Amino acid sequence: MSTADRPTQGPRHAAGQYPRVRLRRNRADGWNRRLVAETRLGVEDLIWPVFVTEGSGVREPIASLPGVDRLSVDLLVEAVGEAAALGIPAVALFPVTPAHLKTPDGREATNPDNIACRAIRALKTSVPQIGVFTDAALDPYTTHGHDGLLDEDRILNDETVEVLCRQAVAAADAGVDVVSPSDMMDGRIGAIRDALDGAGHEMVRICSYAAKYASGYYGPFRDAIGTKAALRGDKKTYQMDPANTEEAMRETSLDLAEGADMVMVKPGLPYLDIVRRVKETFGVPTFAYHVSGEYAMLKAAAGNGWIDNDRVLMETLGCFRRAGADGILTYAAVEAARLLRKG
Ligand code: PBG
């Protein structure tokens, strides 16, 4: 065919544009979608928060967290054993303290035989292959439900940090792998690092709740550990204002300078912009906490048949990965691990 006979002159389609370019081609088949997926969720990305309570053979459901129970140490060991068998790398332990052990100064926090320390010892003996995180904060132990010591209406910073150091050392003596200060006092990471090192625990890690916001999403958690009714006022003088991003960067950079090994952003889904900036700016292990209220919203909507539980759960956890989170604390960790296993 001579040039003159060609029906059109030049390329029929402009380069780099539709209809030459069709992004739907790479979405056309399951194999192709899998091949080009940019992020993946694996069981190794999950940290399972668990609640431990006194007694034995005790399993107490939490109404606002469907599917989550407070477990006595014996049942906790079993449950965590199953989580380990599913490949979940770590659990985050939260104690439920009986009312008669709560005091204004939260002194039970530093008792080497408190429920958290007993649970840590049992877990590290029976399920040594799983990592154990525990909070440094006083709220499970104070009558007023605050994370620190209270003077009238003021949360005392430096006095609280001193107690947190002793709490962290007690947990480390019991065998905890990671201390997670969730209290938002100033200067606590450096002080806890020094206290741990001074007690011979230089390999105990610190995961700081670096950017923790004063959030309404913690409601069901406070039901779970029994602090909601007790809580006087709110936590806005120490937890962050949801309006702020730059402050989250300052908090994170200070915690890293003070020796944090890993950092966390909390809550999760509504704060994925913070997760992204922290990960991009600092390039350190960054976790996000899919908190109790987020989990409760999913379960409530799914329970009503308004959304598909499994689909929305996996999408949600995948979004954390897309935002840059290296790990996700979620009450749905075991459920998600089972779904991942099914494929
Ligand atoms: C306590 C603590 C809280 C959570 C984790 N550690 C509650 C709070 O700060 O009041 C919330 C977790 C959740 O909502 O799932 N320092």
Image: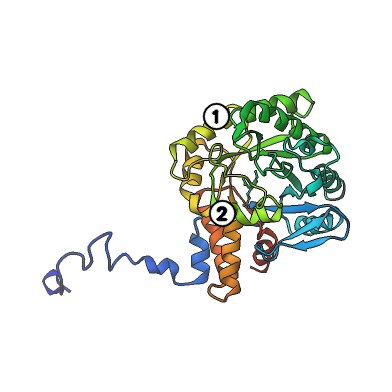
Where is mark 1, residue-wise?
254
Side (left or right) of 316 relative to 245:
right
At 54% from the left edge and 63% from the top edge, which residue is drawn? 315
Task: Decide: few, some or many residues near mark 1? Use Cα within 10 Å; few <14, some 14-19, many ≥20.
Answer: some
174 sits left or right of 151 in the view:
right
Quarter of image, res 3: bottom left
**Does the Cβ of the disc 2 residue fall within 8 Å of ligand 1?**
yes
On the image, the x and y values in percent for residue 218 come to 60, 52
Residue 136 figure quarter = top right
Residue 129 showing in the rendered view? no
Placement of 48 over or under 136, stated as above or below: below
Q: Which residue is drawn at 78% across and 37% down?
A: 171
Seen from the viewer's position, the closer of residues 77 and 141 is 141
Question: Which quadrant would the C terminus be assigned to in this image?
Answer: bottom right
Q: Which residue lies furthest to the left in this view?
A: 4
Residue 59 at x, y = what percent?
A: 80, 62
- Read off the residue under disc 2: 217
Q: How many marks?
A: 2
Q: How far apart are marks 1 and 2 (CA)?
A: 25 Å
**Quadrant of the snapshot with the N terminus:** bottom left
Residue situated in front as seen by the camera: 272 or 60: 60
Amino acid type indicated by mark 1: Leu
- Identify the residue at the far bottom of this view: 305
Give the label on residue 25, or none. none
Picture layout, residue 248 above or below residue 319:
above
Residue 270 picture location, percent across and down: 49, 53
Amino acid at circle 2: Tyr
Q: How crowded is mark 2: few (under 14 residues within 10 Å), some or many (20 or more)?
A: many
